[in-house]
Image (tube, coloured by chain):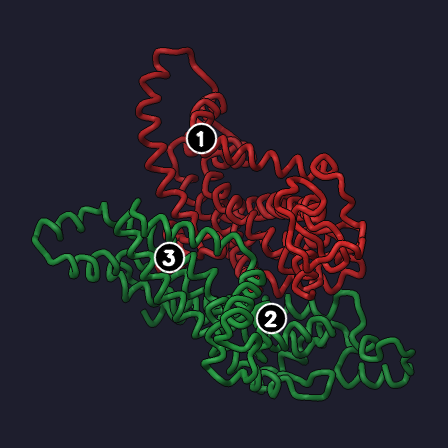
Amino acid sequence: MPDIHDEDSYEPHPKPGVSRLDYAGEQGMAVEQETLVERDVVKREEARSLWGDAWRDLRRRPIFLISAVLILLLVVMAIFPWAFTDADPRKADLVNDYLKRPDWGDVFGVGWFGYDAQGRSIYARVVYGARASITVGIFVTAAVTVIGGLTGMVAGYFGGAVDAVISRITDIFFGIPLLLGALVLLNAFSTRTVWSVVIALGVLGWTQIARVMRGAVLTVKQADYVVAGRALGAGTGRLMFRHILPNAIAPVIVVATIALGGYIATEATLSFLGIAGRRGARRPRSEASLSEGSAS
Amino acid sequence: MGSYVLRRVLQMIPVFFGTTLLIFLMVYSLPGDPVAALFGEKAADPAVVASIKHKYFLDQPIWKQYLHYMGNLFQGDFGTSFTGRPVADIMADAFPVTIRLALMAFVFEMVLGLALGVVSGLRRGSIADTLVLIMTLVVISIPVFVLAYIAQTVFATNLGWVTPTVQDSYDLSQLILPAIVLGSLSLAFVARLTRTSIGENLRADYIRTAVAKGLPRRTIITRHLLRNSLIPVVTFLGTDLGALMGGAIVTEGIFNVQGIGNVLYRAINQKEGPTVVGIVTVLVIVYLVASLLVDLLYAVLDPRIRYA
């Protein structure tokens, strides 16, 4: 891969989510073996949709089931935090000593995780704080996937001058470190909420996805079915979204999933630096508790 | 080779101007008046404000400010911070510290990351492999400031091996703990990348051939396996050096290292435009040069790659 801008030899610089290769290596092996077995079975039964197939495959894997339950639990926690704790995350009672050890026996109780310096229940703050983290993670990933996916798609599909211009713009945004850029941007917001963090990270974070998407589109657009589609008179939009997109989206999904965790960590860091949202005001956040904990 | 380097350098020019313009716009055109911020709570005298704005070129349209800044930059002048100190001076104080810190973190993540990656890649499924996977997963999941505080508590407060914060930023031995914390996240990535890459190449035909030829195991691993497995790792390490320098904000803050991160964080909060733009410009240059070097290193590692 001599030049990241040469066609075919494109290899995106792995930014935070490098373990993409890791993922592909392990999953690739497992999927291969499974589909070999599956193919024989499928012949004998009635045809299933692609999604039906995927679902059938997935629900047999314990790892998938365990992770799905965990994710579901966290999402429910973000939507209905009051279902997980009776304690009010804002109620500060100085009787509760933060130097006292957490009461691990009191499962789901107010003092389960102990108290912070203001005497607020840390467990309640973690439960209520989950919403901010999950909102940032999901919405930044969505924004980044849409912006990066579209620009990467356009660059890869049209090539030539369009590609050259878009790739340079991508390079420009890629050159600014995410945390630094987000700090500068967030400083311009007079009132900062979770959504300003989403905007700041979305504006600066799309480059990685754009590079991956562009690389995937470059390989896919030479496939026979794309040529056939074009020969049959399919328009640009149809070729892009019906033929190329479904076949080029896999690496994007992998990178986006790994990046999701990275955005949550970045938001936590911004919170820690005291720049994301009004710390400790109105909306409790688990990360804010971390930085408050460090101060005490 | 020569023309390839030339082409890459030419491509770097628009990216350099674009990135500096972008950071310039972010710092100077977004809401928030840096001059008013200088006065804090006090009401500012309009005449004084106007004279300060004139001095720092802030009364000009943004594009003129940028051209003015760039013009000075190419004469080696990074401008003056609002406190009156030349930005070049500030950077001359802070950059050596950050470069040392980043280089130590870099060596740490490279040596240990490669070693862990090779061990776990060669023995997939072994206890060592599982341990490396769990360890790296933990490091990847925890934000760096939590790691920093844990390290501080364990090594300074409990064990007493080091002082909690760095007393003298020019003392290399005091930078060891911050460097380890700073490099730990990248260490996890390096280890995992190496492991995957080695796992893939172990199945390659040339490894089977090398084994069949009866080459000693050591030669196979160092000459055949490692050299072929290093390309993705080198890509990561190359972009990471710049990221380490720019990403040291949190680590430097917690350990009180008087480097770029500390200066930059203060400058961003005080809307110290000249300092922010100057430091980020240097970081962008580091990043651009590093990625060029990485691409040139490919050819050394893999002779199949030729540059036209």
Q: Give the number of the disc on residue B245.
A: none
Read off the residue under disc 3. Answer: B191
Q: Are marks 3 and 2 on the same chain?
A: yes
Among the chains, which one is green? B
Disc 1 to disc 2, C-alpha distance: 41 Å
Q: Nearer the viewer, residue A127 or A221?
A: A127
Left or right for A88, reference B181: right
Residue B99 relative to residue B63: left or right? left
Could you say whether the residue bearing mark 3 is in a helix, strand or loop? helix
**In front: B48, or A295?**
A295
Q: Which residue is mark 2?
A: B254
Q: Disc 3: which chain? A: B
Left or right of B74? Residue B201 is left
Closer mark to the observer between disc 1 and disc 3 = 1
Say which residue label 1 marks.
Answer: A62
Crowd class of label 1 (few under 14; some 14 to 19; many from 20; radius 10 Å)? few
Residue type at tag 3: Ala
**Is there one chain holding both mark 1 and mark 3?**
no
CA gap between label 3 and label 2 equals: 26 Å
Count neighbours of disc 3 (C-alpha within 10 A) and say few if under 14, some if 14 to 19, many if 20 or more: many
| Quadrant housing the N terminus of chain A | bottom left
Q: Colour of chain A?
A: red
Do the residues indicated by labels 1 and 2 lie within the same chain of the protein?
no
